[in-house]
Structure formats: structure tokens, C-alpha cells
Image: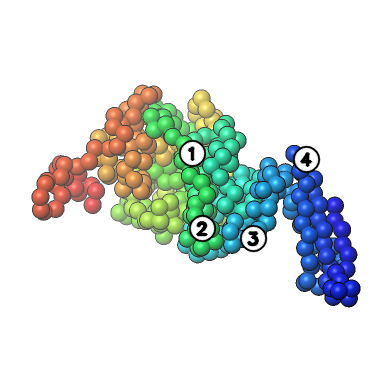
């Protein structure tokens, strides 16, 4: 309930409005605030300010704040910090875009903000306590640990940035990530399954064959396949320079921000040479000449998997990348070389992506790949043999 009346000082109107806001909370207590509205002599503007304050208090009450919590939230941003809704645009502009994060990272953060942070829009950052973080984990109990950790990392970056910018005094909570099962074996095609997939792709069309070979023989990610250009290919030397990835129509650097060079297999080089066209700089286009998308690649792979008679036809392009790493591991390629060729930032990722044989449940026996032997004392590090040093270089 909101009441307004003209404020008088010693019986003389001052042109200000006295506002009385009363809100009954779910626990039966009553929030009341009496204040002077000095921004304008207009009663309409004073009424709008009072209605906005009442709506804000009711929103805080619906978020579960008691009377003391609502009063603390309304004390001001100096003590409680800005609300999540007000600080979020500053984070996107001053952190994400200023640090030139990839467009996919921006999309991921915006999605997390809309889907998972919505109940906290009106909360001050200081009100995000350990209890609320645990309740957030509870709401995400049916999601994968990787998804939960992505949400928690986004929240951690948000709060740490607010502290660094002096918008918040200290971290209001402790964020502990969920444990991820590193023993999980990634999906990959066994050798006979991959041969069937390549044969079905060749019968389906040149685009399907190239996608299968670029993923399984060269280890390119889906965005790297979409962003591949003819200038990135050296058919004489048989090399692919992976320096671009596209996500939702926006081209950028590959994952990790590093360019890598991948050798071609003989069948991949032949398929690229026979597919050469003059429709544009990109390798892949739709039949009408428009750019391809993630859905187009997924649809092509799904169709080919069905033609090959594979069990799960889901069109997962990353499964081809897992196949590339596992085939290198089965060929006894050093783990450091697999890391370089796949563009993994950490050797742990290369080990998890490269099972030792094609049988289910088998992967690299060590949680971390074996490190090259190193000589104690001065001098440069020594690799096991010259071949390993040559491959890594």
C-alpha cells in the first residue's frame, strides 16, 4: 500500500512529497518506509517512485528475504553492492567484451544468466550466500557435472570481478565445483565403424565424405570445419592450417586461441582435390550458395550414420574428433604429439580423448599422460627418443 501527501514545514508546503510505503510480508511482518521525494514536485513522479519501491520490496520478499534482509538490500549499493541485474551489463561490457572473449563464450554466459540466474535478478551481490549457491546446485542436480561447473564458474567470475572493481567488499560465498568423473570413456568409432561411416559418406555426397574425413582423419572441431577456407589448405604439402572457427555465424580463433597445422591423409587430400570449387573462399556451402551452420553439419552426419547402419545416429561431430585421437593412440603416437595435433591446451584433455584400443571401457591407464623423461640438473629437457622430439616440434 502506498500513501502520498504534501510535506509541510511549519505549516508551509515545501513542494516535496512525503511517501509512505507499506508491504505485508509472507511471514506476517510489515515492511514500512517513510521518505521524502525531492526529485520533482510532480505527484505523478512521486507516485511512480513509490510504486516502484513497493514492487521492488515484493520482489525481494518473493525471493525469500525476510524483513531484515529486505532492509539490508535497500540500504544502498555501498554496503550491499549492486544487484545482479544492474551489474550484469557492466560485466559483459567491461570484462567479456573488453577481454575479447570468443562469441561462443559470450553466448554461453548470456544463456546461463537467463536460465539459471533469473531468481537472483533483484538480489544484491552480497546476498548471494553459500546457502543460495547450494540451492542453485540442487536445482541443477539433473544436469551433467560439466554443465553445473560452467554455471558455477560464471558465478565465480562475476563475483570476483565485482570485488576487483570495488563494487563489492569481499566474496559473499565460497564456490566449490562439482567433481567430474574422469574415468568416463568418450564416445568414438571403432575402426570398422569408421570405415563404414566413410563409405556411406562417400555414397551420400562429397560434402559428407569431407566432413567425415576432416573430423576422423584430421581431428577438426565442428566450428573449425564450418570456418575452413581454401587458403588454409596446402594440397601440395598435404597440410591443413587450422586458424579459424565459426559459431552461430561469427568467425573467430579456434578453441584455445592457437593456430595448429595438421597433416592430411592420402584419402583426405584426394577428397579435397576432387571437391575443389569456385563458389567462394569457404570449403563448404549449401546448394543455394549460402553459408552452412551447425545444424547443417549435424544433419549431414546424422543422415550418414543412418545409411551406415550405426546404432546411435545422433550426428555428433565431436565423436569424430574422439575417433581421431583414439586412432593416434592405438598407433602408438606419443601423447604430446596427440596434444599438438588435436589442439588441446592440457595433456589431460588429450589423455581423456584417446583410449588405447577400440574396446569399450579402455582408455589411457594414467589419469595424466606419461611425461617425457627429464634429466636432473642443468641443460635442456630430454625426450625419450629423437622421433618423439621430431613429432612434437
Q: Report the mark closest to the observer, 1 or 4.
A: 4
Viewer-nearest of discs 4 and 3: 4
Q: Considering only vertical position in the picture, is 297 above or below 40?
A: above
350 or 79: nearer the viewer: 79
Q: Residue at x 58, y 41 (%)?
A: 132
In the picture of the structure, the residue carrying the numbered disc 2 is: 169
Task: Assess whether mark 3 and mark 2 are in contact (beta carbons under 8 angstroms).
Answer: no
- Residue located 10% across and 50% down the image: 377
Q: Earlier in the sequence, mark 4 or mark 3?
A: 4
Q: Secondary structure at mark 3?
A: loop
State which tag comes first along the sequence, 1 or 4: 4
Dot 2 or dot 4: first in sequence order is: 4
Q: CA distance from mark 2 to mark 3?
A: 13 Å
Spatial CA distance of label 1 from label 2 is: 30 Å
Task: Rate crowding at label 3 as few (under 14), some (14 to 19) or many (20 or more) other CA atoms within 10 Å.
Answer: few
Secondary structure under badge 1? Answer: helix
- Pick the front one: 229 or 63: 63
What residue is disc 3 on? 76
Quadrant for residue 63, please give it.
top right
Disc 1: CA contacts within 10 A as few (<14), some (14-19) or many (>=20): some
User: Which of label 2 and label 4 is nearer to you?
Assistant: 4
Residue 146 is marked as: 1
Horizontal side of 319 relative to 339 (left or right) equals: right
Task: Name the N-terminal-most of marks 3 and 1.
Answer: 3
Looking at the image, residue 282 lies above or below residue 114 = below
Residue at the spot of label 4: 28
| Mark 4: secondary structure | loop
Q: Residue at x 82, y 62 (%)?
A: 19
Could you say which disc has been placed on residue 58 in the image?
none
- What is the x, y in percent for residue 65? 67, 45
Q: Are marks 3 and 1 in contact (CB under 8 Å)?
A: no
Amino acid at each position: 500500500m502506498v500513501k502520498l501527501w504534501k510535506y509541510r514545514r511549519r505549516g508551509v508546503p515545501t513542494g516535496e512529497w512525503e511517501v509512505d510505503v507499506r508491504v505485508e510480508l509472507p511471514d506476517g511482518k510489515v515492511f514500512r518506509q517513510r521518505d521524502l521525494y525531492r526529485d520533482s514536485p510532480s505527484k505523478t513522479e512521486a507516485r511512480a517512485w513509490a510504486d516502484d519501491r513497493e514492487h521492488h520490496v515484493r520482489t525481494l520478499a518473493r525471493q525469500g528475504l525476510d524483513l531484515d534482509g529486505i532492509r539490508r538490500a535497500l540500504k544502498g549499493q555501498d554496503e550491499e553492492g549492486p544487484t545482479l541485474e544492474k551489474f550484469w551489463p557492466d560485466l559483459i561490457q567491461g570484462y567479456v567484451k573488453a577481454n575479447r572473449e570468443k562469441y561462443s563464450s559470450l553466448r554461453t554466459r548470456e544463456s546461463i544468466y537467463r536460465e539459471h540466474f533469473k531468481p537472483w535478478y533483484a538480489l544484491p551481490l552480497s546476498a548471494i550466500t553459500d546457502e543460495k549457491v547450494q540451492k542453485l546446485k540442487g536445482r541443477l542436480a539433473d544436469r551433467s557435472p560439466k554443465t553445473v561447473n560452467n554455471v558455477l564458474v560464471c558465478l565465480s567470475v562475476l563475483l570476483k570481478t565485482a570485488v576487483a572493481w570495488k563494487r563489492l567488499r569481499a566474496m559473499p560465498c565460497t564456490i566449490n565445483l562439482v567433481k567430474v568423473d574422469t574415468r568416463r570413456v568418450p564416445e568414438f568409432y571403432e575402426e570398422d565403424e569408421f570405415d563404414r561411416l566413410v563409405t556411406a559418406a562417400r555414397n551420400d555426397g562429397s560434402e559428407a565424405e569431407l566432413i567425415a574425413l576432416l573430423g576422423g582423419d584430421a581431428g577438426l572441431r565442428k566450428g573449425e570445419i564450418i570456418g575452413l577456407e581454401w587458403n588454409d589448405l596446402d594440397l601440395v604439402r598435404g597440410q591443413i592450417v587450422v586458424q579459424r572457427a565459426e559459431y552461430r555465424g561469427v568467425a573467430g580463433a579456434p578453441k584455445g586461441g592457437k593456430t595448429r597445422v595438421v597433416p592430411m591423409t592420402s584419402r583426405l587430400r584426394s577428397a579435397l582435390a576432387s571437391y575443389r570449387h569456385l563458389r567462394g573462399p569457404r570449403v563448404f556451402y549449401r546448394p543455394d550458395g549460402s553459408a552452412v551452420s551447425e545444424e547443417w553439419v549435424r544433419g549431414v552426419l546424422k543422415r550418414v550414420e543412418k545409411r551406415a547402419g550405426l546404432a546411435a545416429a545422433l550426428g555428433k561431430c565431436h565423436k569424430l574428433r574422439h575417433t581421431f585421437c583414439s586412432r593416434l593412440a592405438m598407433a602408438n603416437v606419443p601423447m604430446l604429439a596427440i596434444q599438438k595435433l588435436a589442439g588441446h591446451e592440457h595433456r589431460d584433455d588429450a589423455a581423456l580423448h584417446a583410449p588405447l584400443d577400440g574396446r569399450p571401457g579402455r582408455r589411457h591407464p594414467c589419469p595424466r599422460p606419461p611425461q617425457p623423461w627429464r634429466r636432473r640438473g642443468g641443460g635442456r629437457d630430454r625426450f625419450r627418443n629423437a622421433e618423439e622430439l621430431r613429432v612434437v616440434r
